Amino acid sequence: MVAEGLGATVLPDFSVVGDPLERRGAITYRPIAGDTARVLLNAAAPPAESVPQAAGDLHEAFVRRARELSHSSPREPLQTPEHYT
């Protein structure tokens, strides 16, 4: 609805920044002054000898993005479960 010009909404920046709609200018974001919110993502999987390629790729994308975000604000170290390495 926002991309169609039908209104505004509040979304977390990680769901907008880099989105194809944002890259082509159909949507934009404005930071909230004084925002100190943290995002915690815990990815869990049952122990397995092998992980499907798609699951491993998704986990890698999450870790890569978390590392990018952590450069601007130091956080706790990222931990990667052994069955994802």
Image: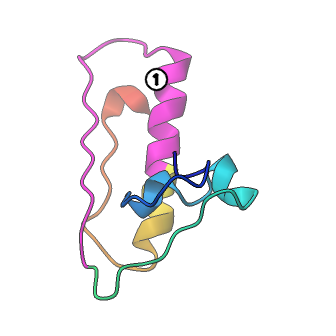
Q: Position of residue 72 (x, y in %)?
A: 44, 80
Above-or-below relation of 30 to 58: below
The residue at 48%/14% (across/down) is: 52
Q: Which colour scheme is used?
A: rainbow
- Report whether 31 appears left or right of 17: left
Front residue of this view, candidates 83 and 64: 64
The residue at 55%/18% (across/down) is: 53
Position of the C terminus, as image quadrant, is top left
Amino acid residing under circle 1 = Ala
- Report whether 51 appears left or right of 37: right
Above-or-below relation of 38 to 84: below
Would you identify the image quadrant in which residue 50 lies?
Answer: top left
Q: Where is residue 5 in the image (x, y as percent from the top left)?
A: 59, 55
Q: In the image, which residues are magenta?
A: 36-63
Name the main secondary structure of what is drawn in magenta.
loop
The residue carrying mark 1 is: 55
